[in-house]
Image (tube, rainbow, N blue to C red):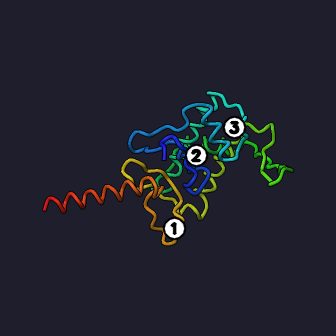
Amino acid sequence: MNTTDFRFYTGALSTDFVATVGRRLAGGDERLTSAARLTEWLARAELVGPQKRVSDGDLQQARELREVIYRLVLARITQRPVTAADIRVINDWARRRTPAPQLSADEPFTLQTRDGDDVGTALGVVARDAIELVTSTRATSLRACEATDCGMPYLDLSQGHTRRWCSMKECGNRAKVAAHRARRKKDTAC
């Protein structure tokens, strides 16, 4: 998987948004590198149409919201307090009007947003998802990836709640390969 690909496997819209930065614990790989990339993420998350125009100001605000959500989720995972400033920011975003879903008449049926929906409205949906996530019973399933360079938050929905990595294909595979190499190195040293 390419490091610039978007991740939509963390279990919640808000944590998928946080995943627009990869390998956080190793300096971070920014995936929202332009207004066009933000448009792409919002469209793939089905919050706006692919032709929505996003400004550089929207991009900056989206990145700031993303970091607040990251700190909020991390605080919930670690049982640490959240700053008053972060609470204010997330609540301000969550107050934005809710987009009304519209059903397309085309077959197969598709969900559409109204033409007037804007980036702020879409980001408000993400903020509300974050608040609902950290205040719901689902929050007990929040985890942070154990890969030393990752730390991406995700919902552990595995049967035994024993998931350790955000993705077995990425971080889990790298960890298993590293463990295998360490075992082989130890065996050859004996």
Residue matched to label 2: 17
Q: Give the image location of residue 164, x and y in percent.
A: 43, 61
Image-quadrant location for residue 157: bottom right
Q: Nearer the viewer, mark 3 or mark 1?
A: 1
Is residue 21 in sight in this rendering? yes
Which residue position holds label 3? 120
For residue 26, the mark is none
Three-letter residue code for mark 1 = Ser
Q: Could you tell which of marks 2 and 3 lies nearer the N-terminus?
A: 2
Residue 143 in picture, x, y percent from top left: 48, 58
- Determine crowd level at label 1: few under 14, some 14-19, many 20+ residues with C-alpha closer than 10 A: few
Q: Residue at x 60, y 50 (%)?
A: 14
Distance between the alpha carbons at the discs numbered 2 and 3: 14 Å
User: Is 45 rendered above or below residue 53?
Assistant: below
Count neighbours of disc 2 (C-alpha within 10 A) and say few if under 14, some if 14 to 19, many if 20 or more: many
Q: Nearer the viewer, residue 140 or 1?
A: 1
* Marker disc for residue 158: 1
Q: Earlier in the sequence, mark 1 or mark 2?
A: 2
Measured Cα–Cα span from mark 1 to mark 2: 21 Å
State the image coordinates of residue 66 (x, y, percent, origin top left). Answer: 56, 42
Mark 3 closeness class: few <14, some 14–19, many ≥20 residues within 10 Å: some
Along the line of sight, which residue is nearer the eye, 51 or 14?
Answer: 51
Q: Which residue is rendered at x = 60% and y = 58% of the image?
A: 135
Please state which amino acid type lies under the numbered disc 3: Gly
Amino acid bearing label 2: Phe
User: Helix, strand or loop at disc 2?
Assistant: helix
Task: Indicate the secondary structure of the residue bearing disc 3.
Answer: helix
- Residue extending furthest toward the bottom: 160
Figure quadrant of residue 137 = bottom right
